[in-house]
Structures are given as C-alpha cells and as structure tokens.
Image (cartoon, helix red, strand yellow):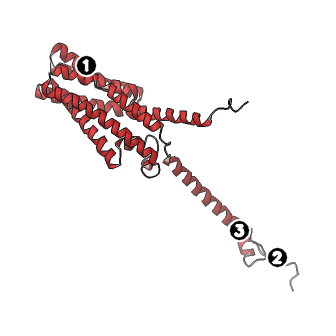
C-alpha cells in the first residue's frame, strides 16, 4: 500500500469532529422536528384566523395542537424540553390574544422573547461570555473550559453569538413594524415565514464556526481520569504498605509480633 492509499487520519478526525458538532447542535436546538413542532401551532392559529376571523377558535386550536404534540412525545418517551417551551409560548400568546381581543397579540410574547434573546446574544458576546457557549458547553461536555483553556473555541462561540444576535435582531426589525402598523394576517404569515429559515441559518453558521475551531475539552473525561488515577494511587499505596508489614523479617525487632508467631530458638532450653 502506498502513502497515497493510506487513510488520512487528520481528515478523518476532522470529519468526525464536524459530525459530532452537527449532532450536538441538533440536540441542543431540537433538530428539524423541534423546529416544526415550534412552528406548527402558530401556523394553525394564523390559518384558522385568516379563514374564520375567530380569535378564540384559532387560539384554542393552536393550544390543543401543542398539547397533542407533547402527548405524542410522552408516549414515545422522547425529550420534552422543546415541546414544553412550545406549549408555554402558545399558551401565553393565546391568553394575550383572547384577553385583548386582538389577534396580533398572539404573536407579541414570542416577538418580545426573540428581541430579548437577540440582545442577550449580542451583549454576552461583547462581555466575553457568549451565550451560545453557555448553551452548548454542557452539550459538548466542556462546560466553561473554553473560556480559559481553549481560546480558539471561545472566539468561535463569540462569532456564533454575534450571528444569532444579528439574525434575530433583523427578524425583530421586520416584525415589530408589522405589529404596529400592519394587520394580524400580514403579521402572522410573515412571522411564520421568518420562523424556521433564520434559525436554520443561525445553526448553519454556528456549525461553520465550531467545525473550524479546536475540539472541545471533555472535562467529564478529565475528572473521571483523575478519579481513576487517585484510586490507583491509593490502591498502590495500600498494597505497598501491606507488603512491607507482611514481609518483615522474623529476626527483626518486630518479627514475632508482626507475623503473630513465636520466634523459635534452635538451642534446647537449659
């Protein structure tokens, strides 16, 4: 086999790192299914309100669908993190819309959350504590090690936080004028159109930044290795101490006491 036929370990490791990054990002943000489940109840609200012009009917239908999606996850024993957050957002929006009598208020809690999140990403990146790093650190089993021990990864998290912040800020810049000056139908359909694509773009840019960054430091593996080394050191110390005691020479000052046997004198008693 020539050198050209040998597999390139570095390229294989890079591909593995990119695959791990992709899998972790999908886990952190719910994947395609999580995005769909987050968007679908709002889509039902907008569609029903567009056709029926009935806030209560649209709100109850959207909330019922959210609960149904959670029930399906429960039956399948899937993670409920993203499903519960979706139910909470739909429930708050439904209450806002029904209490105010304005269908646009169904979207207001989510819009406020998006705007606040965009500011959180930007401010955290400026402060050197990028929010995306705080979110993904535990997912990659690195916790906050990237802040002090992995500067290249910290830079990647800062870039990713800026990407998320600016994309969500642009989304808010489109939606809030429609909330103030547009009607509920326009706002609803534009918000649905701006649901999944900006998130996919943010996740993709995050993947690009992290795939080019140094690999994460697995602090959990380090702790396990340290604990294993401590146990091995204690076991070796105990074994060494036991060997020294058991192996004491019988003619020594503690020979008979250590072994629990009498020292025998070969000469007969007088």
Q: Residue at x 26, y 34 (%)?
A: 169
Q: Tell me if residue 59 can be seen.
A: no
Instruction: State the separation of the CA atoms marked 3 and 2.
Output: 22 Å
Dot placed on the residue nearer the N-terminal end, 2 or 1: 1
> Secondary structure beneath disc 1?
helix
Q: Position of residue 257 (x, y in %)?
A: 71, 74
Whether residues under marks 2 and 1 lie with C-beta atoms below 8 angstroms apart, the answer is no
Identify which residue, 29 or 65, lies in the foreground: 29
The N terminus appears in which quarter of the rendering? top right
> Secondary structure beneath disc 2?
loop
Left or right: 163, with 104 as reference point: right
For disc 2, the neighbor class at 10 Å (few under 14, some 14 to 19, many from 20) is: few
Q: Nearer the viewer, mark 3 or mark 2?
A: 3
Identify the residue under disc 1. Answer: 44
Identify which residue, 262 or 116, lies in the foreground: 116
Instruction: State the separation of the CA atoms marked 2 and 1.
Output: 97 Å
Above or below residue 268? Residue 134 is: above
Q: Position of residue 246 (x, y in %)?
A: 72, 67
Q: Quadrant of residue 66?
A: top left
Q: Residue at x 26, y 30 (%)?
A: 171
Identify the residue under disc 3. Answer: 244
Left or right: 247, with 92 as reference point: right
């Amino acid at each position: 086999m020539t050198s050209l036929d040998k597999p390139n370990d570095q390229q294989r490791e890079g591909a593995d790192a990119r695959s791990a990054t992709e899998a972790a990002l999908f886990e952190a943000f719910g994947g395609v299914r999580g995005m769909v489940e987050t968007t679908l109840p709002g889509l039902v609200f907008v569609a029903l309100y567009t056709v029926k012009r009935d806030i209560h009917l649209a709100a109850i239908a959207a909330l019922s669908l959210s609960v149904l999606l959670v029930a399906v996850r429960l039956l399948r024993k899937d993670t409920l993190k993203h499903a519960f957050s979706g139910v909470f957002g739909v429930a708050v929006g439904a209450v806002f819309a029904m209490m105010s009598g304005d269908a646009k208020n169904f979207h207001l809690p989510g819009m406020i959350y998006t705007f606040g999140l965009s500011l959180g990403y930007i401010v955290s990146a400026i402060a050197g504590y990028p929010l995306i790093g705080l979110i993904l650190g535990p997912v990659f089993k690195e916790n906050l090690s990237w802040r002090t021990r992995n500067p290249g990864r910290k830079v990647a998290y800062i870039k990713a936080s800026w990407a998320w912040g600016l994309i969500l800020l642009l989304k808010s810049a489109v939606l809030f004028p429609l909330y103030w000056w547009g009607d509920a139908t326009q706002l609803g359909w534009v918000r649905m159109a701006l649901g999944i694509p900006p998130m996919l773009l943010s996740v993709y840019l995050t993947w690009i930044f992290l795939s080019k960054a140094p690999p994460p430091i697995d602090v959990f593996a380090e702790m396990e290795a340290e604990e294993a080394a401590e146990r091995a050191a204690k076991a070796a110390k105990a074994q060494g101490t036991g060997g020294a005691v058991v192996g004491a020479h019988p003619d020594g000052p503690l020979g008979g006491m250590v072994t629990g046997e009498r020292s025998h004198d070969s000469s007969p008693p007088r």
